[in-house]
Image (tube, helix red, strand yellow):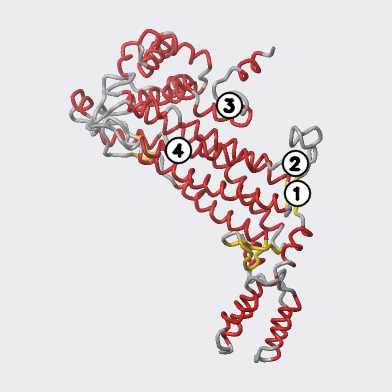
Amino acid sequence: MDHQLRSQLMSVSPLDGRYQRHCAELGDFFSEFALMKFRTQVEVTWLIHLSMEPSIHEIPALDSTAIAELQNLYESFMIEDAEEIKKIESTTNHDVKAVEYFIKDKIAHTPLLKEKLEDHLEFVHFACTSEDINNLAYALMVRNARDQFLLPLVKSVDRKITECAQEHSEQALLSRTHGQPASPTTMGKEFANVAHRLRRQIKQIEDSPILGKMNGAVGNYNAHYAAYPQTNWPEVSKHFVKALGLEVNPYTTQIEPHDYLAELFSAFSRFNTILIDLNRDIWGYISFGYFSQKTIAGEIGSSTMPHKVNPIDFENSEGNLGLANSVFNHLVEKLPISRWQRDLTDSTVLRNIGTGFAYSAIAYRSTLRGLEKLVISPKAIAKDLDNCWEILAEPIQTVMRRYRISEPYEKLKQLTRGKDITRETIRDFIETLEIPEAERDRLKSLTPSNYLGNAIDQARSI
């Protein structure tokens, strides 16, 4: 049996098994390999930053060749490097310290770097607590995953829903409020509603700041000032964090307090909740026959009912979005809480960030697959509309109000509630109204399919 298939079949989590192909790209951002790579980047970049600080004379200024050689430690980081760090960790029993030792060993065995830094190896991890490295590594992981993978994916969901809105902008649709027939809309307008909601969350995801800190064991630069009391360490730290492409959080304990992560996860959770809402609505429209689904040769809907084509993509998406939000909601509640200046409960939780995003990615792709398969069924939609002439009670009683006809609501209630209403019933009632002839003709021209307000314009404009 193929080794990869065997590995997937033996996986405890479907993220590494059944669904692995749908979220594999996230391994570049949230795997342990990725965490080691980003830790290496932070450690190396801090060393380079210190070498350029004028008030620190003990470490030599590095030329561009030496800097490039150092940067190559993370830019060309390979699985063999991660395995070497794991080997070191088996002795140190400390994952960040293992990265520090790995970097020192690489410097010692790289001729150019050895010449420049052999006597200055202790400036690797200088004045740092592990959380100085970790918080920045996780910040880089989240920022890169958001910008390079997640935002393009959520925007592709928005684009497809917008496409559906415009494609079906004129398709009249019977609304259902409280599950009962209500004033009609268009299928496109209902997609447009979702697109507008999703875009608000996408904007918040895009604008969410990614914060970092480099300020020592309890956030006061204690060790930094002990070694170099004349150095402006807050400025050094600020320039370093900004050079990584992050925003500085100037007030922390030992850990960056993770509020920004909670904000970002909340935005993704809201995006996911809106998508759950869409999945359930489409599921219902498929049930009504408003949509059919393109069949794929060889696929089976039911193991016992050959005729069935189940809405599995929308169901799969809904289930995985629920799992994603469960993870995100726990992260939101847990991460901003830390006993006194530090406890380790956030450490193990942070390792599961990728889980929430992986379930989300699986769900987004499932929704996209489902939307690609939809085929609208105008006849089924028209049939339901034509069976609900009573929904025109609303415009009729509203026009009656305009012309001061007494008790319009009550008269339409008496006409329509609990009765079978047809086109003729409506037309006969309109004929009795004492309103201008032009208004009477306008009301008689209304049908459940054209009483749409500005639904078409809204769908086209999204």
Q: Hey, what amino acid is under mark 1?
A: Ser
- The residue lying at 54 percent from left, 51 percent from top is 198
Mark 3: secondary structure: loop
The disc label shown at residue 328, or none: 4
Comparing 392 with 278, the one in front is 392
Q: How far is mark 1 from mark 2, CA to CA? A: 9 Å
Q: CA distance from mark 2 to mark 3?
A: 24 Å
Q: Which residue is mark 1?
A: 292
Q: Residues within 10 Å of mark 2 (few under 14, many from 20)?
A: some
Q: Quadrant of residue 246?
A: top left
Which one is in front in this view, the residue at disc 4 or the one at disc 1?
1
In percent of width and height, residue 224 lies at 23, 26
**Which residue appears at 75% of the width and 75% of the height?**
423
Q: Which amino acid does the dot numbered 4 rest on?
A: Phe
Give the residue number, with chain letter if any, for mark 3: 14
Contact check, label 1 and label 2, Cβ < 8 Å: yes
Tag 4 and tag 1, C-beta contact below 8 Å: no
What x and y, as percent, mark residue 445? 74, 79
Front of the two marks 2 and 3: 2
Residue 397, placed above or below residue 24: below
- Which label's residue is closer to the chain start, 2 or 3? 3
Determine the CA span between mark 4 and mark 3: 18 Å
Residue hosting label 2 = 309
User: Could you tell me residue 342's position as x and y percent?
Assistant: 27, 29
Q: Which sits earlier in the primary sequence, circle 4 or circle 1?
A: 1
The local secondary structure at tag 4 comes to helix
Label 3: few (<14), some (14–19) or many (≥20) C-alpha neighbours in 10 Å: few
